[in-house]
Image: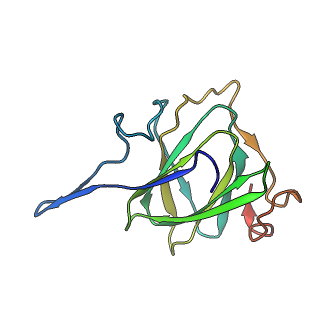
């Protein structure tokens, strides 16, 4: 396990009208603070990754489809792989300095909602990208995929 990574199965409240998902609450232990909310869409056959943040914690929730999310602790060469989908609602907490990326493993694109702890700074983003074929990355399946 990588320190600070947490996967929480989310409560789903269902009745005859449909369902309600609680995605992130300020009274949950995993909540740190709110920066903003956005959705990123990943086409099947593409990878969005590798990158990390020095300050920001990410909170990923799959809104549509299924995603393979891979996390790497570069200091210990630990790799964790998660499969998240809209069928089994979960939130994945990714702490600062953990390298991460994801791909859609759906027939169609997947949509991931992120609720990061920091507001995106357009002039000085807290985002440090690493090439998919970087030799020091211990996860090799994405080496020849399309993406960044």
Depth check: 80 or 115 in front? 80
Residue 72, how many percent across, how many down? 71, 55
User: What residue is rendered at 40% in x and 64% in y?
Assistant: 86
Camera-nearest residue between 98 and 38: 98
Tag count in the figure? 0
Residue 145 lies, in percent from the top left, at 75, 68
Location of residue 97 by image quarter: top right
The residue depicted at 68 percent of the width and 30 percent of the height is 125
44 or 97, nearer to the observer: 97
| x, y percent for residue 38 | 48, 41
Q: How is the image coloured?
A: rainbow
Q: Is residue 148 left or right of residue 55?
A: right
The residue sitting at the right extreme is 135
Image quarter of the C terminus: bottom right
Query: Image check: 81 left or right of 108?
Result: right
Residue 79: which quarter of the image? bottom right
User: In the picture shown, does residue 129 fall above or below 9?
Assistant: above
Q: From the top left corner, tell me how far across and down residue 106 is, in percent.
A: 51, 72
At 30% from the left and 48% from the top, the residue drawn is 22
Residue with the most extreme top position: 123
Q: Quadrant of residue 87?
A: bottom left
Q: Quadrant of the N terminus?
A: bottom right
Single out the residue that lies furthest toward the bottom: 107
The answer to whether residue 130 is above or below residue 120 is: below
Look at 64% across and 52% down and name the residue there.
Answer: 2
């Amino acid at each position: 396990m990588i320190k600070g990574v947490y996967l929480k199965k989310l409560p789903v409240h269902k009745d005859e009208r449909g369902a309600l998902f609680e995605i992130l609450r300020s009274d949950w232990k995993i909540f740190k603070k709110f920066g903003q909310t956005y959705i990123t869409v990943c086409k099947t056959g593409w990878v969005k990754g590798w990158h990390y943040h020095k300050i920001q914690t990410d909170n990923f929730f799959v809104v549509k489809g299924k995603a393979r999310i891979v996390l790497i602790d570069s200091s210990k060469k630990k790799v964790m792989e998660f499969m998240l989908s809209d069928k089994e609602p979960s939130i994945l907490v990714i702490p600062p300095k953990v390298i991460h990326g994801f791909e859609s493993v759906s027939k169609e694109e997947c949509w991931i909602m992120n609720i990061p702890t920091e507001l995106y700074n357009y002039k000085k983003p807290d985002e440090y990208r690493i090439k998919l074929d970087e030799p020091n990355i211990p996860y090799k399946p994405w080496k020849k995929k399309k993406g960044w």
